[in-house]
Image: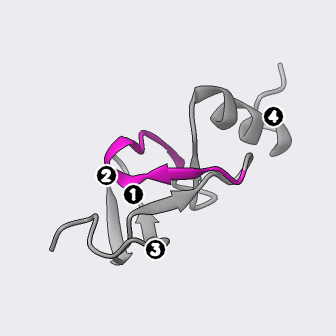
């Protein structure tokens, strides 16, 4: 099944190093910004929190919010 089937929001299970499509769709939402992320460009997610991120900056922000980015 094509990951892009359907134009709505997909439901994914985030694993390492890939994700599994639970409900097909064209995008997921960034947990930090709320932006739509087309599945064909999705590169950042958290397995622990089961969240997607638009980019590395959003991923870092999620880590900081979770308290994992502190030195």
- Say which of marks 1 and 3 sits in front: 3
Drawn side of residue 68 relative to residue 43, left or right: right
Residue 25, numbered label? none
Q: Are marks 2 and 4 in contact (CB under 8 Å)?
A: no
Marks 1 and 2 sit apart, C-alpha to C-alpha, by 5 Å
Q: Are marks 1 and 2 in contact (CB under 8 Å)?
A: yes
Task: Give the labeled residue for mark 1.
Answer: 15
Report the magenta residues as a range: 34-46
Q: Quadrant of the N terminus?
A: bottom left
**SS of the residue at dot 1?**
loop
Task: Give the labeled residue for mark 2.
Answer: 18
Q: Is residue 11 above or below residue 31?
A: below
Task: Give the labeled residue for mark 4.
Answer: 64
- Say which of marks 4 and 3 sits in front: 3
Residue 8, numbered label? 3
Asked whether residue 37 is drawn in magenta, I would say yes
Q: Are marks 3 and 2 in contact (CB under 8 Å)?
A: no
Q: Are marks 4 and 3 in contact (CB under 8 Å)?
A: no
Q: Earlier in the sequence, mark 3 or mark 2?
A: 3
Q: In x, y percent, where is residue 61?
A: 76, 34
**SS of the residue at dot 2?**
loop
- Say which of marks 3 and 2 sits in front: 3
Q: Is residue 53 above or below residue 57?
A: below
| Crowd around label 3: few <14 · some 14–19 · many ≥20 (10 Å) | few
Outermost residue to the bottom: 23
Q: Residue at x 73, y 38 (%)?
A: 63
Q: Is residue 7 above or below residue 17?
A: below
Q: Quadrant of the C terminus?
A: top right
**SS of the residue at dot 3?**
loop
Q: In x, y percent, where is residue 34?
A: 70, 54
Q: Earlier in the sequence, mark 4 or mark 3?
A: 3
Marks 1 and 4 sit apart, C-alpha to C-alpha, by 21 Å
């Amino acid at each position: 099944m094509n990951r892009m089937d359907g134009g709505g929001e997909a439901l994914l299970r985030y694993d390492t190093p890939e994700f599994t499509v639970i409900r097909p769709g064209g995008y997921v939402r960034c947990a930090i910004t709320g932006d739509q992320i087309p599945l064909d460009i999705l590169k950042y997610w958290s397995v622990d929190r089961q969240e997607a991120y638009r980019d590395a900056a959003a991923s870092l922000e999620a880590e900081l919010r979770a308290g994992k980015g502190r030195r």
